[in-house]
Amino acid sequence: MIEKNIVFNLLKKLMKSHFLAILSFFPFFLNPSTVRAESDVPDTVNVGIYITSIHDLDFRQKQYSVNLWLWLKYRNTDFDFMKNLEVPMAKSVEKSYATIDTLEDGRIYMLMKLQCVMKGTWRIENFPFDRQKLRFSIENSMYDSKSLVFSSDTIGKHYGKYFLNEWEKDSFNIRTEIKAYETAFGDPALDEPHSEYSAYRATIVIHRNSWEMFFKLFLGMYISFLIASICFFIHPDNMESRLALSVGSLFAVIGNKYIIDSSLPDTNTFTMVDLLHAATLLYIFFVITSSVYTLRIYRTGDEFLAKKQNKVFGWSLLLLYLMINLWVILSAYNSVAAG
């Protein structure tokens, strides 16, 4: 009788424990969206960068080069960033070093060194006192934002002390976002031509206050201006000398402009380079015009009036040219300095 009670109590406890176990899963059967919501949470990839150098800013080719260290921490081994890493704005990407390790919490730690040639969108309105915005971003080419999202590793600095040459850094911003593509990339599983991928972005704003480069570029133009100005010190009757100096200066300014334009991208906007050369060309044109006018006055027999008009034209054109130059140059310089 005692043995039967013991067996009965054991069976009763087993049934009770199984009943509680089944009961614990009962809410999930009532609300299956709870399980589905947990499975829909994308995996987080922690990303950090350290830029060692930005160099070879090529305005003509609209590109620049950047060397950097990139590290990623994640759990899903299927992500495989060695094969699936995408740098959307890059013309070329070279991985010169890469290592993979496993952290104590089970996450994968990947470190790689990248050498990228990036596409640049240059603003040259105020060249050589220009401000530029450099962009670097990464995505995973295989997994969209439903499976993978990036987060920023904000510990420490993201760039070296001498990562820029001949430029000054204004700001360095890092953010993560969801980038939308209005296409399904041919995936028949998607009902609409729309897909979204997580993106990690770094934006660097730099500027250059290079007075040395300014004088190097425009020295020939200002020498031509001075040569043309000598015409006002030549007697109004000596028209051949005046025209020779003016025409020589004219071709020198045009040549100087073509040399500068050869290093800049084509643009529809009127830049500071265009304004300064246009002002110099107009100055030389008015020098030739004033020379012809004073020569006509001189040949009427009024030498005093011819010399007086020559002096008035000389000082007036000189002051007007200097004022235009100061206004154009200081406007460009101050717009960059003010940010």
Image: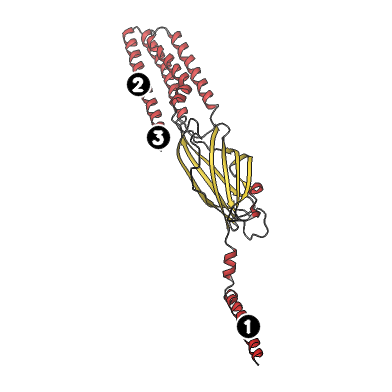
- Dot 3 lies on which element? helix
> Which mark lies nearer to you, 2 or 1?
1
Mark 2 or mark 3: whose residue is earlier in sequence? 2
Marks 2 and 1, Cα distance to the nearest angstrom? 105 Å
CB within 8 Å, label 3 to label 1:
no
Task: Give coordinates of residue 42: x percent, y percent.
Answer: 58, 59
Mark 2 or mark 1: whose residue is earlier in sequence? 1
- Dot 1 lies on which element? helix
| Quadrant of image for the C terminus | top left
Q: Amino acid at mark 2?
A: Leu
Seen at 63% across and 45% down, the residue is 99
Which mark is on residue 319? 2
Q: Is residue 277 visible?
A: no
**39 to the left or right of 124:** right
Which residue is the site of mark 3?
337
Q: Amino acid at mark 1?
A: Met
Q: For residue 43, which quarter of the picture? A: bottom right
Task: Give coordinates of residue 250: x percent, y percent.
Answer: 48, 18
Seen at 54% across and 35% down, the residue is 53
Which mark is on residue 240? none
Marks 3 and 1, Cα distance to the nearest angstrom? 80 Å
> Which mark lies nearer to you, 3 or 1?
1
CB within 8 Å, label 2 to label 3:
no
Task: Give coordinates of residue 133: x percent, y percent.
Answer: 49, 39
Which residue is the site of mark 1?
15
Seen at 61% across and 81% down, the residue is 19
* Outermost residue to the front: 2
Q: Amino acid at mark 3?
A: Ala
